[in-house]
Image (tube, grey):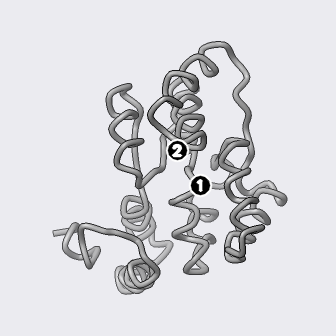
Amino acid sequence: MPEIIFDCCVLSNFALTDTLWIIEKLYTPKAYLTDLVNVEVIRGIQNGYEWLESVNMAVKKGRIKEVFLRRKPEKQLFEKLSVSLGAGEASSIAVAKTRGFVFASDDRAARNEAELLGVPLTGTIGILLKAVKKNVISIRQGNQVLKAMIGNGFHCPVKSLSDIRK
């Protein structure tokens, strides 16, 4: 399984529904976030989004690893992408492109940029479907999680994972 790098929105969807364990079960030890996404998580906690503490704990325990922009091509791509994207999304795409990671995001603009660069993509729905396929959760549980995410503000084009699996 390839490494995967997450933006804050996908992590937040799972943290908000107390299901970050699904990401950990599917992707540890190949789950990553950039230091700039981690800053978003920490600022979120400081601003009262306490559910993000589970992401912070996953990073502290090494279940999601923090990475930094370290090479010139990553930094150059980050600068280019930062014109139209937030720092978290731009840094995640830069790492995904240069290191061959999958990029996990639900942000349409970020997904479009990643697609243009040929970066493999997934998002909240793709992760839930993978969890069902890998028997981490049942389709019923997946639909319950999706319903909870939608109830908490996740804008989703489908109401049921069953609609996609057909």
Residue 140 lies left or right of residue 83; in this view the side is left
Q: In the image shown, does 123 or 47 lie closer to the viewer?
A: 47
Q: Is residue 102 above or below residue 59?
A: above
Q: Position of residue 31 (x, y in %)?
A: 63, 49
Observer-nearest of 118 and 41: 41
- Residue sitting farthest toward the right: 60
Q: Position of residue 25 (x, y in %)?
A: 61, 65
**Is 46 above or below relative to 8?**
below
Q: Position of residue 151 (x, y in %)?
A: 41, 84
Q: Residues within 10 Å of mark 2 (few under 14, many from 20)?
A: few
Q: How far apart are labels 1 and 2 at the CA level? A: 8 Å
Q: Quadrant of residue 66?
A: top right
- Find out whether the residues at labels 1 and 2 contact each other: C-beta distance under 8 Å: yes
Q: Give the number of the disc on residue 98.
A: none
Secondary structure at numbered mark 2 = loop
Q: Is residue 133 left or right of residue 40?
A: left
Point 26% across, 78% down: residue? 159
| Percent x, y of residue 1 | 52, 44
Q: Amino acid at mark 2?
A: Met
Residue 164 in which image quadrant: bottom left
Q: Which residue is mark 2?
A: 1
In the rendered image, which residue does mark 1 sit on?
27
Q: Nearer the viewer, residue 3 or 80?
A: 80
Is residue 124 placed above or below 138 in the rendered structure? above
The amino acid type of the residue labelled 1 equals Tyr
Q: Residue at x 35, y 80 (%)?
A: 139
- Residue drawn at x 49%, y 29% is 83
Quadrant position of residue 126: bottom left
